[in-house]
Image (cartoon, grey):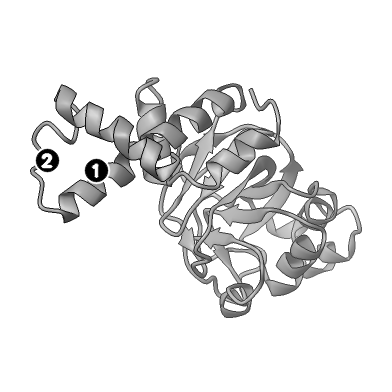
């Protein structure tokens, strides 16, 4: 489980690829959110507990534009209740032609202190969202007119986002490549292991740039390599 902010801080420095390997070791193979990418690259990780919103196929008689006047509309309500430091994760049925949100709602989410936003659908006004100081991930820009293909139906429930299972308070990590979901009860150990793996990967890259073979180095199967790694850690404070 997540014991404190140290776990969040550790995850800020571990790539999604490395985290995927750590989860794979535990038999979890479907934690990467498929077919989503950063609206704009931020050069740093998005990390935070999940706060979820689920969409379903819209039924025309109950999903007119007039519904957005309702102050309890689940989409609007999610924006106004997502806790600071959390990541709003939306199950938009993988439909990029359905607008999950636009720049005004994402700006409000940013101002309220959210750590980021993820949808397996699309955003309206994606070019403006990319300029905001909040990490945002989607499939591709949605058509500005397709507001009523999906209906926002439920807040903070288990969802599927890009084929990944997401439960409220699971830890979401996004880098400039992709997004991964870490089950809450595994977050502390995955974060610690991820930091260790990242240190070794950095050591490996340094040795490969220096001309070394990957045999015995990656993966580490040579005791001499492991001894060099321990010396490298001392010198580099890792």
Label located before the other in sequence (2 or 1): 1
Front one among 127 and 203: 203
Q: Quadrant of residue 134?
A: bottom right
Q: Can you give x and y, in whole percent of width and height, for residue 91 in the image?
A: 59, 47
Check disc 1 and report its element: helix, strand or loop: helix
**Looking at the image, can residue 180 be seen?**
yes
Q: CA distance from mark 2 to mark 1?
A: 8 Å
The quadrant of the rendering that contains the C terminus is top left
Q: Residue at x 8, y 35 (%)?
A: 215
Task: Name above or below for residue 49 compared with residue 183.
Answer: below
Q: Residue at x 61, y 34 (%)?
A: 7
**Looking at the image, can residue 221 be seen?**
no
Q: Are marks 2 and 1 in contact (CB under 8 Å)?
A: yes
Q: Which residue is mark 1?
A: 204
Which numbered circle lies on residue 214?
2
Check disc 2 and report its element: helix, strand or loop: loop
């Amino acid at each position: 489980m997540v014991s404190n902010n140290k776990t969040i801080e550790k995850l800020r420095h571990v790539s999604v690829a490395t985290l995927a390997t750590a989860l794979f070791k535990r038999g979890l193979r479907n934690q990467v959110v498929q077919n989503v990418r950063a609206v704009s690259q931020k050069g740093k990780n998005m990390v935070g507990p999940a706060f979820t919103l689920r969409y379903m196929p819209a039924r025309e008689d109950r999903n007119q534009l007039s519904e957005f006047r309702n102050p309890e509309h689940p989409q609007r309500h999610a924006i106004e209740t997502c806790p600071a430091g959390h990541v709003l994760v939306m199950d938009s049925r993988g439909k990029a032609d359905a607008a999950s949100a636009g720049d005004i709602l994402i700006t409000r989410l940013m101002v309220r202190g959210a750590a980021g936003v993820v949808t397996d659908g699309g955003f309206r006004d994606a070019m403006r969202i990319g300029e905001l100081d909040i990490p945002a991930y989607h499939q591709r820009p949605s058509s500005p007119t397709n507001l009523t293909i999906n209906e926002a139906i439920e807040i903070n429930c288990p969802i599927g986002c890009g084929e990944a299972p997401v439960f409220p308070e699971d830890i979401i990590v996004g880098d400039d490549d992709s997004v991964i979901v870490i089950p809450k009860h595994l977050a502390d150990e995955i974060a610690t292991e991820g930091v260790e793996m990242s240190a070794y990967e950095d050591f490996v890259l340094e040795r490969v740039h220096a001309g070394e073979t990957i045999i015995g180095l990656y993966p580490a199967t040579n005791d001499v390599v492991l001894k060099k790694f321990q010396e490298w850690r001392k010198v580099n404070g890792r």
